């Protein structure tokens, strides 16, 4: 299907950056630069920044999202935040399964699946992250690995629910390293993910799902990555903290 019929989504992942006051300033700086965006624009912020970011985003086309959520609705889970809590404050988008969660906080494919379930049950849209390490790429198992991560994460997700899932392909070796996948590498894996979706849900779902690339996407390389036929957007770390760079990426998605 023609890529232009799919929704392009550029999402910032602020990671553990910015205080609430700084969040407000950053959203205020980004908003005028992206107001004419021809794609969805999202900023996923630390939990403590959500309120101030939402306040600053009011009346703009920027949607505010979270970076994680727990799979239970409530309970004895010290330090955790549930999807219902996010929804109660008007947050409708959440990143699940980011490689930094997998790498540093014991996230597994199974816990990713549980979090996806909880977020969808709460009515949220999920940005599901998958991607291989350098070692896995060198072993030649990228396709199998990414297919497996995708299949497990989406276990039990219906075709209807899938409409609220965006998949972000983020090669671990390209995150925060300045090392970007080539446009061909990015497209190849995004295409593989689309084939997995086709296998699981059929062609209409595969044609309709938004698949992002993430990993050192910046103002200089965004246009080439976003022009690829299977790359429908980006999940942006470092460059999402720089208003002008982020705006250039949004502009590239509008054209791509
Ligand atoms: O992890 C990422 C987005 O989720 C990518 O981070 P960088 O853009 O800083 O490489």
Image (spheres, grey):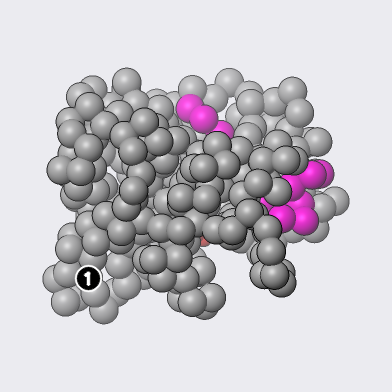
For the C terminus, the image quarter is top left
For the N terminus, the image quarter is top left
User: Can you give x and y, in whole percent of width and height, for residue 86 in the image?
Assistant: 68, 46
Please identify the quarter of the rendering in which residue 231 is found. Answer: top left
Q: Is residue 201 visible?
A: yes
Q: Which residue is mark 1?
A: 137
Q: Nearer the viewer, residue 153 or 56?
A: 153
User: Can you give x and y, in whole percent of width and height, for residue 71 in the image?
Assistant: 55, 58
Task: State left or right for residue 21 relative to residue 5.
Answer: right
Instruction: Name the residue furthest front.
Output: 75
Q: Nearer the viewer, residue 200 or 254?
A: 200
User: Can you give x and y, in whole percent of width and height, for residue 152 in the image?
Assistant: 31, 59
Q: Which residues are magenta?
A: 39-52
Q: Residue at x 40, y 36 (%)?
A: 161
Q: Residue at x 39, y 66 (%)?
A: 110
Task: State left or right for residue 31 relative to residue 138.
Answer: right
Q: Residue at x 17, y 31 (%)?
A: 203
Packing grade of label 1 (10 A; few <14, some 14-19, many >=20) is some
């Amino acid at each position: 299907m023609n890529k232009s019929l799919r929704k392009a989504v550029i999402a910032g992942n602020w990671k553990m950056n910015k205080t609430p006051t700084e969040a407000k300033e950053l959203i205020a700086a980004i908003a005028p630069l992206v107001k004419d965006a021809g794609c969805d624009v999202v900023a996923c912020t630390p939990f403590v920044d959500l309120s101030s970011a939402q306040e600053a985003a009011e009346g703009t086309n920027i949607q505010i999202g979270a970076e994680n959520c727990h799979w239970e609705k409530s309970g004895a889970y010290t330090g955790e935040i549930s999807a219902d809590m996010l929804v109660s404050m008007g947050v409708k988008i959440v990143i699940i399964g980011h490689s930094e969660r997998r790498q540093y906080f014991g996230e597994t494919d199974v816990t990713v699946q549980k979090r996806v379930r909880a977020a969808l049950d709460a009515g949220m849209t999920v940005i599901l992250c998958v991607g291989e390490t350098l070692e896995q790429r060198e072993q030649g198992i990228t396709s199998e690995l990414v297919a497996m991560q995708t299949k497990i994460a989406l276990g039990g997700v219906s075709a209807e629910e899938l409409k609220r899932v965006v998949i972000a392909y983020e090669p671990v070796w390209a995150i925060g390293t300045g090392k970007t996948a080539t446009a061909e590498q990015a497209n190849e894996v995004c295409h593989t993910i689309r084939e997995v979706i086709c296998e699981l849900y059929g062609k209409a779902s595969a044609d309709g799902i938004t698949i992002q690339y993430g990993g050192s996407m910046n103002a200089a390389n965004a246009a080439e990555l976003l022009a690829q036929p299977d790359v429908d957007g980006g999940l942006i770390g470092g460059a999402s903290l720089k208003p002008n760079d982020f705006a250039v990426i949004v502009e590239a998605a509008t054209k791509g």
